[in-house]
Amino acid sequence: GKGGYDHYMLKEIYEQPTALRQSIRGRSDPLEGRAELEELADDAFEGIESVHLVAMGTSYHAALYAQMLLADRGIPAQAFLSGEYGSSPPPTDDRTLVIAVTQSGETADTLSAVRSVQGTGAHTLAVTNVVGSTITRECEDTVYIRAGPEIGVAATKSFSSQVATLVLLSERLSHDITGGTPRATAELLEALSVLPDDVQRILDESTAEAVAAEYHDSDSYFFIGRGVAHPVSMEGALKFKEITYDHAEGFSAAELKHGPLALVTENTPVFAVFTGRDDTKTLHNVKEIRARGAPVVAVAAEGTDRIEEYADHVLEIPNTHPDVAGVLANVQLQLVSYLAANELSRAIDKPRNLAKSVTVE
Ligand code: M6R
């Protein structure tokens, strides 16, 4: 059941500290600076030089997030919409690792993306939540995200657990392919180990209620950020549109001046996501947005006072490593979407036209 919550989505948002603890338990050794994914043999990534990630929807946003983590570690990586992957297949061979990111393990587009590389020599790895799902039979290896069952159509805790698992996987790949940097790994794993507590603090202290109360009446919303805050912005917009039915668009803050700024008015609230990396540039975009009269809700680390000066509202996240700050920012955006949809009395757990898993292409 819903365990006293009005909706599965809210229950699952609140389950995130537990889900994250399960995802990382036994998988990281901050002292040694090593990620240990028990499902993978020591030589699982022998000979791998580059990574393709294939996924749809929320899982695609987790895949884009991982693409950025891998690129930062010097590993050529690209995230693809699995529904596009087979249409113009990028070259793969035995040096390519293809990672299928899928909560359900049953998404038709993602299954066929994996099938499309069979016979090319590419190594395939499933990152999924569902034990024994079809994707686990299609891929050579599987790493489980261990988020626990997700019932709400809107993916919430599965995104957080996917990112946590992909952080661990990125560190493992970095270690295997480039030798890694144990000190940097240790610092990140340390941040990952307190992520469940950081999420709990957000759940206890969020001011998303006030934001949702004030901003649920617009027809259009924008979400912007740089680096991992870019996929988080896309995810924030996806969640917002699927459960409020209002138009919401997420894009890189770098794109703003190249088109979307034309649509920014006093009627288009903008959510600006800060992770502690490239904040100055995003703050500059916020100033441009403010100059057009649009309300700005910043999601940023506590005590970032320059941001407070330019935002109408700040949704605070605990200070942490930029690589995991996106997970925290996303939790604030989940709460805003949920609370706005609730103000609008939407069918939050079963949004119109959508299904939990999309089993046809
Ligand atoms: O089961 P999957 O992760 O493969 O599902 C992919 C998408 O259909 C899914 O993430 C969808 O975008 C979310 N339910 C939206 O909240």
Image (cartoon, grey):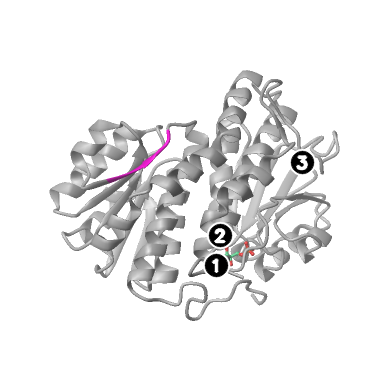
Magenta residue span: 314-318
* Quarter of the render that holds ligand 1: bottom right
Residue with the mark numbered 2: 12
Q: Could you tell me which residue is drawn at 48 percent across and 76 percent down?
A: 351
Residue 245 visible: yes
Please, what is the three-letter code of the amino acid marked with disc 2? Glu
- Determine whether, in the image, residue 185 is placed left or right of residue 208: right
Kindly report which numbered mark, 3 or 2, lies closer to the viewer in this rendering.
2
Please, what is the three-letter code of the amino acid marked with disc 3? Arg
Q: Relative to 290, does residue 282 appear above or below in the rendering? A: above
Please, what is the three-letter code of the amino acid marked with disc 1? Tyr
Instruction: Report if residue 273 lies within the magenta region.
Output: no
Q: Quadrant of residue 227?
A: top left
Label 3 – label 2 distance at C-alpha: 38 Å
Label 1 – label 2 distance at C-alpha: 6 Å
Secondary structure mainly formed by the magenta segment: strand
- Disc 1 secondary structure class: helix
User: Between disc 3 and disc 2, whose residue precedes?
Assistant: 2
- Determine whether, in the image, residue 211 is placed left or right of residue 36: left
Can you give x and y, in whole percent of width and height, for residue 224 in the image?
A: 35, 49
- Determine whether, in the image, residue 174 is placed left or right of residue 7: right
Residue with the mark numbered 3: 95
Instruction: Report if residue 317 lies within the magenta region.
Output: yes
**Residues at circles 1 and 2 in contact by the CB criterion of under 8 Å:** yes
Q: Could you tell me which residue is drawn at 62 percent across and 48 percent down?
A: 18
Task: Name the one closer to the observer, 331 or 128.
Answer: 331
Kindly report which numbered mark, 1 or 3, lies closer to the viewer in this rendering.
1
Can you give x and y, in whole percent of width and height, for residue 285 in the image?
A: 25, 43
Label 1 – label 3 distance at C-alpha: 41 Å
Residue with the mark numbered 1: 8
Q: Quadrant of residue 241?
A: bottom left
Residue 259 visible: no
